[in-house]
Image: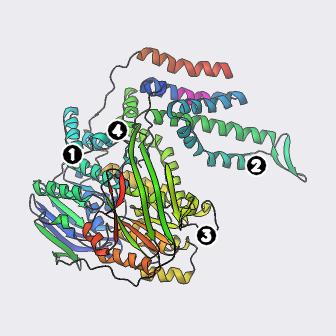
């Protein structure tokens, strides 16, 4: 049983929650949908303890889990009451190998070695991570990292599971599997999301949305089709006979090998790339944007081969994790680093709904994605790759950002796991199956 | 803070048991600070680099060592300016800019820095983190202290990886006609990210139960083949090296 009432503000008078009530029955599965910046991650971190301990802020209220007010417990002592899977996987990964990542919390629970080994085997198998046991977690793809964090949470098995946008970055098959795991679990599970997904269907006992600081029953909304004023250009980005190889150096084995016989994207055109976790979607994006050297083949613009340094100035790459691209202190610092004029910066701020004074460290994941989009928008690249941009953003926000680029004449490649979102773009489709990229 | 520090391999240093390896590492660092001859220092810096090349391959070794270059360059730029006494090597008018003594001081510090960093890199590139913790526990270090030490050991490669990430990110923002990556924003970004990493790591550790009473040791080291011989080598090799080059 979970029963909470929380009042919290990072700064005096600026409330994130004001007497926010939340109650869940034993074994109840609740989905809470809210836009970025509404406090979903803050709520999760308040319950597990890193807010306000490491962020500052004023917290009042209580969170009763199994009759214990966890807010009165030191952070490490809350671990068997509540645990979370962070929206930003890199925040929570601390150890060089997948196995060590799971061993650490289990050792801290004081479990005997035999139980620890049993649980490790069980969760590695549950999340198909056995082959990555000794692989460095930094060598995993975004979806694999998410599965690792889920494995850690399921191994610890607290009374309350908090999954912060945990369906995002998972392939459709893994989303379905996670849905069935939630459905079959006897634990209380709170899933935080920014938009409805088809895989949520039939999984939850209640679906709520945040409205005026209250959790109210969710009102279903469909996904609109993407609309924008088309502006075609003359350049075309293409890849021919590409071979991309990545190996796991921590185990000396091959990570994957991706073959791309042919890929084309024209300025002003939109295309979608689908594929499973770890299939090489991000590596392909890194090759197109010049951050990774291909093993063989060529990347061309209008038939002319492009060196990596030239690709970086031709293709904008909005990485899956926005924090891998945002390092300066404020929104304004980031936008000015593009060399844009003050007028252009102001225009981008208004177009992408950003506040100039925002601090990067205080931004939500979804807001960081909007800033990432604004930043590359100012660079006027003829081509842009949005790597799982739709995760952590409501559909209309993702579509708005895409339409800004398309109306400016950029060719846009959208990497996504969300088939419904892909369909709403009405775009040409590429897919990766069996180590090969091909047109759907 | 998940930089990939361990590199799979089957070299003699990979197979060297962690217990004598830790002893060897500690003695090597102490000796690198006791040597004063220029050729001894040069050898002390070069030896771990050569072993790293053998254990992890030339490409990995050079990419690891390249991360030390900014610090070494800064040392050579600023250290000679600190000691102006001695035989002048570079003067502008009557002002002595660089002296032989100043240059030698920079050389000594940089060689010791490379020796220390590369022998630690060698340790973490050839030993898994859990094994290092178990090795430290063998020397009766408390679990929490062993864990923190193993995280600290990975801090340098993590910072290297972080800087590469920032450099990549900044290079995507370059305007037409510019090359490389913007240095000042990258350095600012690096400092901000490195400082932010401290509370992030601490909160992730605590949320995973670090500091709970009654934590168990999941990993214990068993008997290794020829452990005594390995210990003897781990202790004697650095001493022989010191006697040879002093």
Residue range in magenta is B26-32
Q: CA distance from mark 2 to mark 1?
A: 57 Å
Q: Quadrant of the N terminus of chain A?
A: bottom left
Task: Say yes or no: labels 2 and 4 on the same chain.
Answer: no
Q: Which residue is the site of mark 1? A: A155
- 3 and 4 marks in contact (CB < 8 Å): no
Closer-to-camera residue (B8/A277): A277
Q: CA distance from mark 3 to mark 4?
A: 43 Å
Q: Which residue is the site of mark 3? A: B176
Q: CA distance from mark 1 to mark 3?
A: 50 Å
Q: Is residue A266 left or right of residue B112?
A: left
Q: Kindly state the secondary structure of the residue where label 4 is placed.
A: loop
Say which mark, if any, is on residue A134: 4
Q: Nearer the viewer, mark 1 or mark 3?
A: 3
Closer-to-camera residue (A423/B54): A423
Q: Which residue is the site of mark 2? A: B81
Image coordinates of residue A418 in percent, x first then y, are 27, 66
Q: CA distance from mark 4 to mark 1?
A: 17 Å
């Amino acid at each position: 049983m979970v029963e909470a009432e929380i009042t919290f503000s990072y700064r005096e008078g600026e409330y994130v929650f004001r007497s926010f009530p939340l109650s869940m029955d034993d074994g109840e599965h609740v989905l809470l949908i809210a836009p970025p910046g509404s406090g979903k991650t803050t709520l999760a971190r308040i319950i597990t303890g890193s807010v306000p301990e490491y962020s500052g802020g004023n917290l009042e209220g209580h969170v009763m889990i199994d009759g214990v007010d966890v807010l009165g417990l030191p952070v490490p002592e809350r671990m068997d009451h509540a645990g979370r899977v962070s929206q930003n996987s890199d925040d929570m990964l601390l150890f060089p190998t997948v196995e060590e990542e799971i061993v650490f919390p289990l050792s801290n629970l004081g479990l005997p070695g035999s139980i620890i080994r049993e649980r490790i085997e069980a969760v590695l198998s549950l999340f198909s991570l056995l082959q990555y046991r000794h692989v460095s977690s930094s060598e995993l793809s975004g979806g694999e990292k998410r599965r690792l964090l889920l494995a850690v949470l399921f191994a610890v098995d607290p009374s309350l599971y908090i999954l912060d946008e945990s369906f995002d970055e998972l392939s459709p098959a893994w989303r379905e599997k996670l849905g069935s795991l939630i459905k079959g679990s006897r634990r209380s599970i709170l899933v935080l999301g920014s938009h409805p997904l088809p895989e949520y269907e039939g999984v939850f006992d209640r679906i709520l949305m945040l409205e005026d600081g209250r959790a109210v029953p969710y009102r279903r909304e469909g996904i609109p089709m993407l609309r924008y004023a088309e502006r075609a250009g003359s350049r075309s980005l293409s890849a021919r006979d590409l071979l991309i190889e990545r190996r796991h150096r921590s185990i000396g084995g091959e990570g994957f090998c991706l073959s791309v016989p042919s890929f084309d994207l024209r300025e002003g055109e939109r295309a979608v790339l689908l594929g499973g976790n770890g299939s090489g979607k991000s590596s392909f994006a890194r090759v197109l944007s010049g951050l990774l050297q291909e093993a063989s083949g060529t990347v061309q613009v209008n038939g002319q081969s492009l060196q990596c340094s030239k690709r970086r100035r031709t293709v904008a790459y909005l990485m899956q994790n926005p924090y891998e691209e945002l390092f300066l202190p404020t929104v304004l610092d980031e936008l000015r680093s593009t060399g844009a004029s003050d007028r252009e910066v102001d225009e981008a701020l208004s177009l992408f709904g950003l506040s100039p004074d925002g601090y990067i460290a205080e931004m939500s994941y979804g807001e960081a994605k909007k800033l990432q989009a604004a930043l590359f928008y100012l660079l006027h690249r003829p081509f842009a790759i949005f790597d799982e941009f739709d995760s952590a953003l409501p559909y209309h926000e993702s579509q708005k950002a895409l339409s800004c680029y398309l109306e400016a004449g950029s060719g846009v490649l959208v990497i996504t796991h969300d088939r419904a979102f892909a369909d709403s773009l009405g775009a040409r489709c590429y897919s990766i199956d069996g180590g090969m990229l091909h047109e759907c | 803070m998940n930089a990939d520090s361990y590199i799979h391999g089957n070299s003699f240093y990979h197979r060297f048991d962690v217990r004598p390896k830790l002893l060897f590492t500690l003695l090597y660092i102490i000796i690198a600070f006791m040597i004063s001859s220029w050729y001894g220092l040069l050898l002390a810096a070069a030896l771990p680099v050569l072993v790293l090349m053998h254990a992890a391959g030339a490409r990995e070794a050079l990419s690891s060592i390249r991360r030390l270059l900014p610090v070494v360059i800064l040392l050579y730029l600023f250290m000679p300016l600190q000691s102006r006494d001695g035989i002048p090597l570079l003067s502008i008018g009557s002002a002595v800019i660089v002296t032989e003594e100043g240059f030698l001081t920079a050389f000594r510090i940089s060689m010791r820095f490379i020796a220390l960093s590369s022998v630690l890199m060698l340790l973490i590139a050839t030993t898994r983190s859990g094994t290092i913790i178990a090795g430290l526990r063998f020397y009766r270090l408390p679990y929490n202290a062993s864990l923190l030490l193993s995280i600290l050991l990975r801090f340098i490669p993590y910072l290297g990886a972080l800087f590469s990430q920032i450099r990549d990110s900044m290079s995507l923002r370059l305007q037409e006609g510019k090359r490389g990556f913007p240095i000042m924003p990258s350095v600012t970004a690096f400092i901000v990210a490195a400082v932010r990493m401290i509370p992030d790591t601490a909160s992730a550790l605590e949320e995973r139960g670090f500091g709970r009473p009654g934590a168990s040791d999941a990993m214990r080291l068993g008997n290794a083949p020829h452990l005594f011989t390995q210990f003897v080598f781990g202790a004697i090799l650095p001493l022989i090296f010191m006697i040879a080059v002093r």
